Image (cartoon, rainbow, N blue to C red):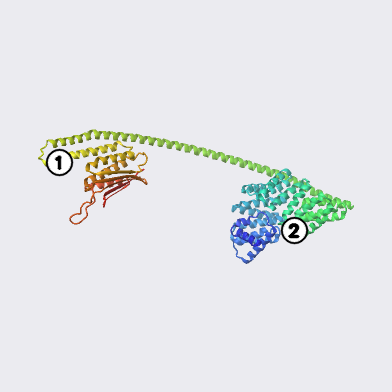
Amino acid sequence: MKRLGYLLVLGWGLLGWPRAAQAQTLPLPLPHLRVLRDSLTELLAREPRPDTLRVLRLNTLGFALRLNDPPRARALARQALALAERLRYAPGLMEAHFTLGYDYRVRNQYDSALFHSRQALTWATRTRNPLTQSRAYYNLCRIYTEQGDYAAALGPSLDGLALARALHRPQVEALQLVQAGRVELGLGELTLARQYVEEARDLLPAVRDSVCTAVVYQGLGDIDRRQGRWQAAHRAYARTLRAYRTIYTERGLLPVELLLAEMRAQLTDEAAVRPTAWQLLARARRLQMPEQTAGAALLLARSWQTTRPDSARTYAALSLSAAAGHRLLPLAHDAAQLLARASGQLGDFRRAYDYQAQAAAFADTLSGEDTRRRLSAAQARALRSRTQLQLDVLRQQQELERLRHQQQVAGLLALLALTALVVVGLVWSFRRRQARREAALRTRLAADLHDDVGNLLTQVSMQADLLQEISPASDAPAQARLRRLSETSRRARREMTDVVWGLQTPLLTLPALLTRLRDHAYEVLPAAQLTVDFDVTDAGPEEALPPLLGQHLYLIYKEALHNVVKHARHATHVQVRVARHEGQLRLRVQDNGQPAPASAAGEPAPARSGGGNGLRNMHRRAEALGGTLHAAPGPAGFRLEARLPAP
């Protein structure tokens, strides 16, 4: 069941989240590693199709086996690289180069390790994968550190640390902090090294990963070992070993076991660790691990130094051979010194002198390299500080340029705003003056119409009435003409009064217009023996209406009432409805008159039109405002409805 569950998780990672599957930064526990190895091996054998999924599986398996089965991991990474190059699959190229860079570093083939690690960094940058960028920086830093080129290691260390902080992933940041501490440890900056590693230790509660914890405590153990704090170093290495047992086979455990044995030798009698040193030496030679072979042989030589100088010289010679052949200069120096002492104890002073000279040469080399390292590191720090200073100055210049640009834009916007305000003010002033001129013109026209034309029409009406009174009653045609003249003049007087009202109300509100409509209805309809039902729905706020809207609506309304009075047969009641609805002003006038009788030929009577001009004028007025007008007879009388757009 556990195997099935892990396979499901693995399958999800491989198929649905390939970047997550490839982006492992720490080894898997051994039980999980076995499941992963067996499952992916089976998948690769069962599905040989050369596609990106196969590249992903090859890379995942190769990366997982990099510690416990390096030859197979190397072969898988090369297969993945070849297939990814053929498919032009960038993520696959990135992961394959990373695994090969790691493999060559572990085997001390640093030129190839640098090439593949730089390629991994390049592809990670192209694919915008910051996690693998950080991993590539980490690997480059390890390569330079193992070569003793700490000045070159500073750049990748600080770049990787900055990128890890930006990722906000405690695990990645902790690993980069430990590596930064190792660089400072190699430069002899023990205080700064401890600061880095202790900062990584402070992140462990957020990481909650035993392997990351082991890396951090191994870093602390190395610092304590350099400072001669054997007990603290022993505790740190013991904690490291406990965590590593869950993920490493004997190849991965051997370096930490050797460090732990060295600390026990410092804390107790060196002879007490002799059995452990025998086992470690045998394993190191069997696994072909030269650094651990040299270290275990040196530990055995020290355990025999006081009692068996011949055995001490034998193991010291083995240590020197392994160390010198792989340029492990600190181990070679210690082995040469021990050989000189053992040879002296055995009376072989010539060889003792040779070994002492060899140890001195190693010491000079180490001293020179240490001096060069420190000088190069100081130069690198100075160069980086100068570069950082230049970048800071450049950023400040860019910030000043940005602020200057913002000020220019703000000034331009302020000028545009001021110009807009001036233009708006001028337009408003012009419209206000124009409105005042129009209002004055309206007032003058209204006064002229009222005073001049109104008086003339009143005189015409009075003269017609006077002539009607003095004319003979027997002259019926003259009496009829005089009555029509008097009625026409009075009607003209009322029409003119309406025109004057329209001219005098440029800021007409809907309630004021409704009052005018109601007054006109009660003025006209009762005189024609018609009752009125005047109702208003949702008149709205006291807002000014456009002058044309008020005038046209009033004239349409007047014409509608005129048609009712003149043409409605047997009408006794008129219903008027005014409402504001959905941005429209609606007027409905309906009477209860009877429809006109059909003609002698049986054709229906035409719709009421007031001679033809009334309805046409009403339609034109409604259309001029963008509205509609509908007028038609019905079973309950004639109905007219106007719908005009209202703000």
322 displayed left or right of 638 = right
Residue at position x 62%, y 41% in the image:
390
The location of residue 15, given as percent across then percent down, is 59, 60
Residue 112: give x, y in percent of width and height. Answer: 68, 56
Closest to the observer: 393 or 460? 460
Give the camera-side residue of 343 and 297. 297
Q: How many discs appear?
A: 2
- Disc ID at residue 625: none
- Indicate which disc, 2 or 1, sits on the residue closer to the N terminus: 2
Q: Nearer the viewer, mark 2 or mark 1?
A: 1
Would residue 112 be visible to someone looking at this image? Answer: no
Q: Is residue 334 visible?
A: yes
Q: In the image, what residue type sits under mark 1?
A: Arg
Q: Residue at x 26, y 38 (%)?
A: 498
Question: Residue 481 — which label?
Answer: 1
- Secondary structure under tag 2 reads helix
The image shows residue 54 at horizontal and vertical percentages of: 61, 62
Q: Quadrant of the C terminus?
A: top left
Farthest residue to the right: give it: 347
Residue at figure coordinates x 82%, y 51% from the top left = 336
The residue closer to the viewer here, 642 or 179, is 642
| 2 and 1 marks in contact (CB < 8 Å) | no
* 366 in relation to 61, above or below: above
Q: Is residue 169 above or below residue 84?
A: above
| Amino acid found under the numbered disc labelled 2 | Glu
Query: How many angstroms separate mark 2 from mark 1 (CA)?
Result: 134 Å
Q: SS at mark 1?
A: helix
Task: Return the residue at label 2.
Answer: 250
Give coordinates of residue 531: x percent, y percent.
25, 44
